[in-house]
Image (cartoon, helix red, strand yellow):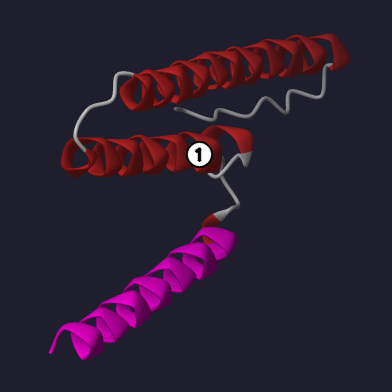
Amino acid sequence: MATNQSNSGHPKVDIAYRRRKNAEDMRHQLVSFAITLFLTLVAFFAVAADFDAWYTVPFILLLAVVQLIFQLYYFMHMSHKGHEAPALFLYSGVLVGLITVLAFTTIIWW
């Protein structure tokens, strides 16, 4: 997503740019919201279909990860410029959490 900023000094041009940019952001959020609703319904149908737990649990976890990505990048505006530092801390926390889960899992299994 290209973020060309308009600072022409002309108020009407800047307002038109901001309106177009806001409309584009709103469209992305609505599409992302529709996709997350669809993924939630798919997860409910997977449970309601009474598939084997060895299939259902990983499938629901995969859908949860996809929803997490949509929510981070569109609802929390992580795709915009200027959010590099919060993204770094967020990904660092995820890395520490995964390493912790991996460490406890290996301690329990071995």
Residue 98, percent from left and from top: 34, 71
Q: Main secondary structure of the magenta part?
A: helix
Amino acid at dot 1: Tyr
In this figure, which residue is indicated by the disc labeled 1? 73
Q: Is residue 53 left or right of residue 47?
A: left
Residue 109, percent from left and from top: 16, 83
Q: Nearer the viewer, residue 58 or 35?
A: 58
Above or below residue 68? Residue 93 is: below
The answer to which quarter of the image holds residue 103 is: bottom left
User: What range of the chain is rendered magenta?
Assistant: 85-110
Q: Is residue 79 visible?
A: no
Q: Is residue 105 left or right of residue 67?
A: left
Residue 110, percent from left and from top: 12, 90
Q: Nearer the viewer, residue 94 or 53?
A: 53
Q: Nearer the viewer, residue 16 or 105?
A: 105
Instruction: Check residue 98 for magenta coloring.
Output: yes
Say which residue appears at 54% left-offset and 18% top-offset: 28
Q: Residues within 10 Å of mark 1 (few under 14, many from 20)?
A: some
Q: Is residue 9 left or right of residue 93?
A: right
